[in-house]
Image (tube, rainbow, N blue to C red):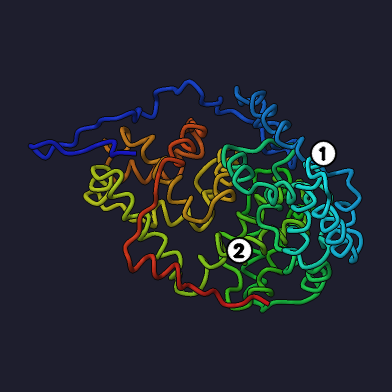
Amino acid sequence: MGPICTKDKTNKIVIRGNAKPVNTPTPNAPPKTINTHKYVGEEFQQEIEKNDPAYSQKQYKWNQYYQKKYELINDDTYIALIRRSTSIEQLQQQTNEDDQCKEPKINSNKHFYKKILMSLAQQLDGPFKLTNQDIMDAYLLKEINNEDFKNILMDGAISKYRWNFWMAQVYRNKDYDPLLYSKLKNQTPTQKVLEDITKDVNRTFPSHDHFKDYNQGQQQLFSILKALSILNEDIGYVQGMNYIVGFSLIVSGGKEEEVFWLIHFINTNPLFLWWEIYRVNFNYTKALCQVFLKNFNEQLPALYQHFQDEGISDQQYIWQWILTQFLYTFPIDSVIFFWDFILATDIFSIIKLSIAFLNEFGYDLIQKDIGQISEFFTGFIKDQLQIDVPKIIKDAKQIDVTMTDDQKQFFKNYKPQSST
């Protein structure tokens, strides 16, 4: 994707490309008024889908994709993967017998999937520990063809499948301990951590019914943040974590323990390492910001220079976007699709989405001064801006994130401290 704006020979800013003024409606943009503050889980997501003109096509695509699981769901060896520790040996014996079959064309499809199951069982190093069958089904689809899984998730999930696919994408069987969360809930962090969490619980999505007063939502949020602060004692609790956990509770429908595991799996997955952005001195966040600024300058040079000339600090926008995974600034009905994209790929997708967003609204931003730009970032995006999310994601897919040699080395050699 080339620059949207450049400077001519007289050093005047020239806007070009497909950037539109903020007030120009885009054909595929859903209406801004979406009543999501009363709902959680699939109901919350269905409110968003009501305003999506492409939902029917997306639903058909997802249902067709999910049909693949029925080729295995009635297979006894598949069910046994989560029920019996002997399933791996049985599966190995069956695949060996099939390999020796004199007529390989007979049941070749079933034989292929048994091979997939064998590979899956070996990777799991034992039966699938999580008892949720729907997550197991999604995990199996990922193992059958990881690229297909990533591509369909990247383009945006539907309410029926989203949460299970998020869980399957980050699930790490070797890390799962069904007793861990209850143990952590019974422990107590430092007084300072408790005070900080308590203070921020009341500030997290205060207009959403799930978090009004000290109801179930706030109790769940408090418990998960407390458990994560104990598990990651060297990081503790930092503001921003509350948005990530709170949003996960909304999307999941208040599945407290699964939210804990989603966040823990993300934090320990080398593709994401979300909690590293909160570590003391914020070195990981600073490194991500530097990569963003490099790519911002390369992709949108005139807009980047305008920000420099106006004195716009990265802490006014990209810093907040990274620390809250867009939740502090953007409406949650947009962020849900940003998370689909990020979880399908890696943490650098935050940079791709940020540049795609700035590209979309570059025409308007380049005409604003520092006060107007600050207002745009602090309130206008969430409260008034009509965002064409499908276009931003489509543009983000075309962006290649580049790094200096030093930046590549930093991320390649980065070793987070153990949380266990």
Q: Nearer the viewer, mark 2 or mark 1?
A: 1
Q: Position of residue 262 (x, y in %)?
A: 69, 58
Q: Amino acid at mark 2?
A: Asn
Q: Position of residue 126 (x, y in %)?
A: 81, 66
Choose top left, top right, bottom left or bottom right for residue 88.
bottom right
Q: Amino acid at mark 1?
A: Tyr
Q: Is residue 233 above or below residue 6?
A: below
Q: Position of residue 151 (x, y in %)?
A: 58, 41
Q: Residue at x 64, y 29 (%)?
A: 58
Q: Residue at x 78, y 58 (%)?
A: 118
Foreground pick, 94 / 303: 94
Other residues around mark 2 within 10 Å, as few (<14) / some (14–19) / many (≥20): some
Choose top left, top right, bottom left or bottom right for residue 99.
bottom right
Asked whether the residues under the numbered discs 2 and 1 touch, taking CB atoms below 8 Å apart as contact, a structural biologist would say no
| Quadrant in which the C terminus appears | bottom right
Q: Which residue is mark 2?
A: 269
Q: Position of residue 311 (x, y in %)?
A: 26, 53
| Quadrant in which the N terminus appears | top left
Q: Residue at x 76, y 55 (%)?
A: 214
Q: CA distance from mark 2 to mark 1?
A: 29 Å
Side of 382 relative to 108 (left or right): left
Q: Which residue is mark 1?
A: 70
Looking at the rendered structure, the secondary structure element under dot 2 is loop
Could one spot residue 219 in this view of the protein?
no
Foreground pick, 356 / 271: 271
Foreground pick, 319 / 57: 57
Choose top left, top right, bottom left or bottom right for residue 403.
bottom left
Foreground pick, 380 / 168: 168
Mark 2 or mark 1: whose residue is earlier in sequence: 1
Other residues around mark 1 within 10 Å, as few (<14) / some (14–19) / many (≥20): few
Q: Residue at x 52, y 72 (%)?
A: 279
